[in-house]
Image (cartoon, grey):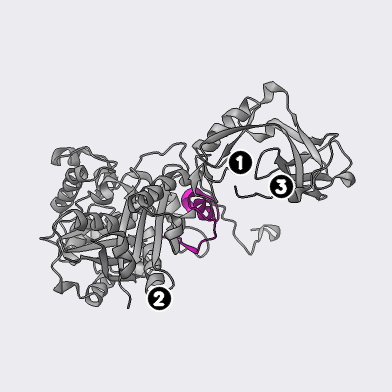
Amino acid sequence: MSEEEKKDYAESPINLEYHYTAGSATTRFLNQVKEGKIVGQSCPKCSAVYVPPRGSCPRCGVATNIEVPLTDKGCIESFTIVHIPIPGNPIVPPYVCAMIRLDGANISFLHLIQGIDVEEIRIGMRIQAVWKPKDEWTHSLENIKWFTPIDEPDVDVATLRFQES
Amino acid sequence: MRKVAIVGYAQHPILENAGALNEVELIMPVVHQLFDELGISQNNIDFTCSGSCDYLQGAAFAFVEGLSAIQTNPPIKESHVEMDAAWAMYESMLKIQMGDADTALIYGFGKSSPGRLDSIISLQMDPYYISPLWPDRVSLAAIQARVLLEKNIITPEQMITAVIEARTNSKNNKNALVTELVDKEAYLASENISSPLNEFDCPPISDGSSAMIIASEEKAYEFTDHPIFIEGIDHRIESSNIGSRDLSKPSGILASIEQLKLEKIKFDVAELHTQFSHEVPYLQSVLNLSDVPTNLSGGPLVGNVMMCAGLDAIGKTYESLKSHDFTNGLAHASSGPCLQHNMLVHLEKKS
């Protein structure tokens, strides 16, 4: 063995493969996303609306069996500005990852914000989805390229806290 | 010590492949079924404990997602074991005995269909230091079967009988996955998996969930006139190093038998967490069950939901005591390769 081939450690990569299942509720959601529609699901007990739905209301422990069509508009509930490039990620820093709260939903999800100087982004800002061309739609929220600010007054996110009915 | 009783048990139909149903969607129906049968809700539960294995789902802390099946508002006290839910029942029982709770909900869930169970169980159980050795669960079981056969502790005929009886008993279990009857010819013709075990000696890949509710003695009588009491419970662990074990000497189980004074009890029924056919005659002999109806549910050979099958042995014993003129039942749960962990549970119906 030559000098440079000497190692004081051994690499032993291991892996397991799975057929991941989204679950029947999330499957219904993703089938709608494929058609360019965002359909949340609501809890029959506390009426909370989940998007994306995971099949149950974790507050009440029951299936979210009521479908609730939502718009692709909402507000920024929180955000962070990413300055460090992530290997394999084509987006050039600095860019913004935000928790998006769609109108009528009681939870938020993570997505990108583009179309505005990062320094101007603020919590409560109104935003709307920018969709990929229809022929690129698949079973994924990546059908939405990013969210972009719209000319509407900011929302006080404190008012978005879930109120038990 | 406070006495603890089982007051309810529910099992999801065992599926070969639950398909799109995720773990939460498997858990919710059994928990709701139990609540409906007892006329209660999560608000009546003081402590909740689950048993599952994150390797089955392939995600760290996957068990936390399972909690989405349970009402958690107002906040609940809960815990989890990375083991069969039989051990979640044990933890819950201790919680009640300590006086921290009067009621407990236990649930277990597992989907074996999404991955390769042999690799998954190997990674979960192999105590590797540098790199996994990847011994698969069937080959490890086969090593123990070989030892038992060569020492004449069990016979090949007993293994065949265990398979045939499991299939016959599956008719008693509406949730059984494997219900096709087999005879000796079919057994002998079935595919060899890992000598001396063939296909019928091994449990089916299974998806499912189970739930149970236990309660303190006073509370139990609020739920039912006939609670089934946990009279004794004992868990012993053999070495994780297979090479240091004598696979024909069940020292842990023998210690449990002594601890629980089982030789003095006339059992009416037993349900054993016997995943492989050779384990049935072996444990029947060790536990002195030759005259005791064993695995009337068919046992794991007709449906083996990972992280549930041990709880199911307790649940099926409970169901047998409830629905028959039986007094004493013995349930057994196991974990690890070659019956490494063994838990014995003595259940008793008070007349």
Q: In the rendered structure, which amino acid carries the disc numbered 3?
A: Leu
Q: Which residues are magenta?
A: B55-84
**Subunit under mark 1:** A
Q: Residue furthest front?
A: A165
Q: Which residue lies at the image location 57% right of the left edge and 37% below the top edge?
A: A41
Q: Residues within 10 Å of mark 3 (few under 14, many from 20)?
A: some
Quickly name the residue at label 3. Answer: A160
As measured in the structure, the alpha-carbon distance from the residue carrying label 3 to the one carrying label 2 is 42 Å
Seen from this angle, which residue lies furthest top?
Answer: A135
Which image quarter is the N terminus of chain B in?
bottom left
Name the one closer to the observer, A139 or B122: A139
Q: Are marks 1 and 2 on the same chain?
A: no
Q: Which one is closest to the eye, mark 3 or mark 2?
A: 3
Position of residue B51 relative to residue A32, above or below, is: below
Q: Relative to B74, is A163 above or below?
A: above
Look at discs 1 and 2 and give the one toward the viewer. 1
Residue B189 as seen in the image, left or right of residue A24: left
Left or right of A152? Residue B5 is left
Q: How many marks?
A: 3
Q: Residue B96, how many percent across, how many down?
A: 39, 70
Q: Chain of mark 2?
A: B
Query: Is B75 part of what is drawn in magenta?
Result: yes
The subunit letter for the residue under badge 3 reads: A
Image location (x, y in percent) of residue B319: 24, 54
State the residue position of label 1: A49
Q: CA distance from mark 1 to mark 2?
A: 40 Å
